[in-house]
Amino acid sequence: MKQLDLFLAFFRVGMLGYGGGPSSIPLVHKEVVEKYKWMNDEEFADVLALGNTLPGPIATKMAGYIGYRVAGFTGMVNATAATIIPTILLMIVLLTSLSSFKDLPWVAGMTKAVVPVVGVMLATLTWDFFKKSNETLGKVNAGLMVVGGLILMEVLNVHPAILILVLLTLAIAKKDNTPKVEKKIERGVG
């Protein structure tokens, strides 16, 4: 049953993720976190951040990792295949027929109409992540990270992968230090 659920979840993402990786991220979140509860929001954010630092399409990287986590190697193959099969089939169908329809106004309108919808989906996911970061980091720290990230990426042109890598490194370093402090407190050492 897990294999079927994995296939259906990522097949839906592959079918509805029009516009590439960014548009599929909210769909993956809906399936993985909300519907099947294979991960929580924090784990999903970690997978998304790590996936963005690696080369290649984000949807297949996330499908591969989540499939492996849920059902091992066969789950990885299943979820990845389910993500790319719709694209392959649609490319074959559309490329063979689209050439005759490409000049029609409704085709151009359809492709232009998708952009704001994807923007709203990404904004909603971003807002959800920001609200959750308020709970874990506090409003001031979360706000500072948002403003700092915007300045680094938009003003100073720092590549997002570099920023994500630095934040992941800091998070790992912080996690390594946390148990040592907790152990000292448990032993009564200040």
Image (spheres, helix red, strand yellow):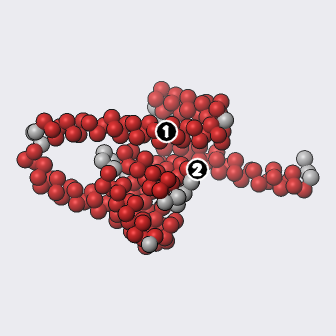
Sort mark 1 into few (<14), some (14-19) or many (20+) by Cα contacts within 10 Å: few
Quadrant of the drawing holding the N terminus: bottom left
Is disc 2 placed on a helix, strand or loop?
helix
Query: Considering depth in this image, is 183 or 154 the residue closer to the camera?
Result: 183
Q: Return the mark for residue 64.
A: none
Residue at image mark 2: 42
- Tally of marks: 2
Q: Residue 127 appears at what percent x and percent y?
A: 51, 37
- Answer above or below: position of 118 versus 15: above
In the visual, does 40 lie left or right of 179? left
Q: Residue furthest front?
A: 35
Q: Amino acid at mark 2?
A: Glu
In the visual, does 24 lie left or right of 179? left
Name the residue located 40 percent from the left edge and 50 percent from the top edge: 27
In the visual, does 174 lie left or right of 23? right
In the visual, does 144 lie left or right of 118? right
Name the residue located 37 percent from the left edge and 45 percent from the top edge: 23
> Mark 1 or mark 2, which is nearer the start of the sequence?
2
Q: Residue furthest left?
A: 100
Query: Considering depth in this image, is 171 or 31 the residue closer to the camera?
Result: 31
User: Which of the 4 quarters of the picture holds residue 107?
Assistant: top left
Q: Residue 170 appears at what percent x and percent y?
A: 64, 45
- Specify whether residue 52 is in view: yes
Q: Amino acid at mark 1?
A: Thr
Q: Residue 114 appears at what percent x and percent y?
A: 28, 39
Q: CA distance from mark 2 to mark 1?
A: 13 Å
Query: Considering depth in this image, is 38 or 140 the residue closer to the camera?
Result: 38
- Answer above or below: position of 119 versus 87: above
Q: Are marks 2 and 1 in contact (CB under 8 Å)?
A: no
Sort mark 2 into few (<14), some (14-19) or many (20+) by Cα contacts within 10 Å: some
Q: Return the mark for residue 126.
A: 1
